[in-house]
Image: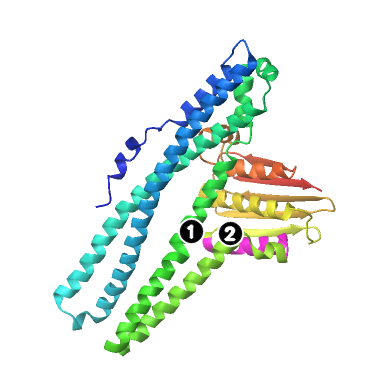
Amino acid sequence: MYGRPAGRLAASFPCDLPLTNLKGSTSAAAETRAPHGSAALAGARFLVSERIADLDDAVGRLEQRLAEAESQRAELRERLEGAEVIRRHVLNNFRHLLPVEVDEAFQTVLTLRVDLATVEERFRELSARLTEVRAGQDLLRTVMRSLEDLTPEEEESVTAAEGASRFRSASRQVFQIIEEERLRIARDMHDGPAQSMANLVLQAEVLEKLLLKDPTAVVAELIDFKSVVREALEETRRLIFDLRPMTLDDLGLVPTLRRYVKEYAEKSGLQARFHVVGEERRLPGNYEAVLFRIVQEALTNARKHATAHGVEVTLTLQSHRAVAVVKDDGDGFDVVATEARQGRTRTLGLISMRERADLEKGSLEIRSQIGRGTEVRATFDF
């Protein structure tokens, strides 16, 4: 009904190379030596460009399958929303309906739930594979930029180890971070406001029919209708705030963090407190946006990974310096070992914070011990 089973999807892509193999081919390209440096560089560039083209084709096929799965998922969710509305109506009026009508309503909901679960699992597997292939693309594009920056003389003077290290360190994972953020926003929009709006349309149609057949039932349905409207509005506001808090531009960093930490505590169930040390004021340039994103990422990590009970956010403002500290009482982790794995995994939270700090010539310090919590400290001088 929905194409091949999700478990067989990976076998259908001819360019399924593990990222470790991609890195291995990169090192091999760096080790290539020829009597003439320009010829060696040209050969390396050709090999890397060919692999990038192969991955571009794989991305195109994955995106097409992902779009098909997304379309099927959206259709099933819309049908399920309508079936749930009918089921609720049946529950409220089952005494006036035939047994076969009640059974049909419940069977429809059950079947749609099973179908939706199957399609969603396929969608998740495709998304994970697409992210992996895009990570390979980004890595190879970084290698290509490094190759283009090398002159033949430089190429001959760089050892294999130095070349591989240079390739890995050059703007790694930047594009992957951007793509994963776009994917997160798209999912949030689809799973939040878009689904709520579809539900509202279905409920409006039900209300229209009930108005003629059973006006007394309209009141109960209107209560559900208003509830969904409020939820859609709140979800839309949350997404807007995540994309770019309007208060950050209008009021500044301190009011924005104060609101964010408060809402974070309410939604996460953690004890979160925000403190300001120094005179509350606006910061120059892009420092406010960078500090907000670093604090946001640190709080997200505390909620997802630290198993924390409480978190403290402290913002210290001096005449030419701003310091943000996020400290939790969670499980803690081995910072050196975790950061060493960053290049081999898609866990990009620490990389994102460090790169944001580096862009504004700031410093980021992460202190953590197993069982003793984590402290993230971002410092900017201006």
Q: What residue type is labelled 2?
A: Asp
Give the residue pinned by disc 1. 188
* Residue for point 19% across, 70% down: 104
Q: Are marks 1 and 2 in contact (CB under 8 Å)?
A: yes
- Between 51 and 225, the residue placed more toward the observer is 51
- Expressed as whole percent of the image width and height from the top left, the position of residue 359 reads 71, 43
Q: How many numbered tags mark residues here?
A: 2
Q: Left or right of 27: which side holds 323?
A: right
Please rate how many residues cluster around mark 2, counting C-alpha atoms within 10 Å: few if below 14, some from 14 to 19, many from 20.
some
264 inside magenta stretch: yes
Q: Is residue 350 above or below residue 186?
A: above
- Is any atom of residue 372 visible in this view? no
Residue at the extreme right of the image, as rendered: 319
Residue at the extreme top of the image, as rendered: 35
- Is any atom of residue 225 visible in this view? yes
Q: Residue 242 carries which label?
A: 2
* Residue for point 70% across, 17% down: 153
* Residue for point 27% across, 80% down: 92
- Expressed as whole percent of the image width and height from the top left, the position of residue 64 reads 39, 47
Q: Which amino acid does label 1 sit on?
A: Asp
Q: Is residue 174 above or below residue 150?
A: below
* Bounds of the magenta segment: 251-267
Picture quadrant of residue 279: bottom right
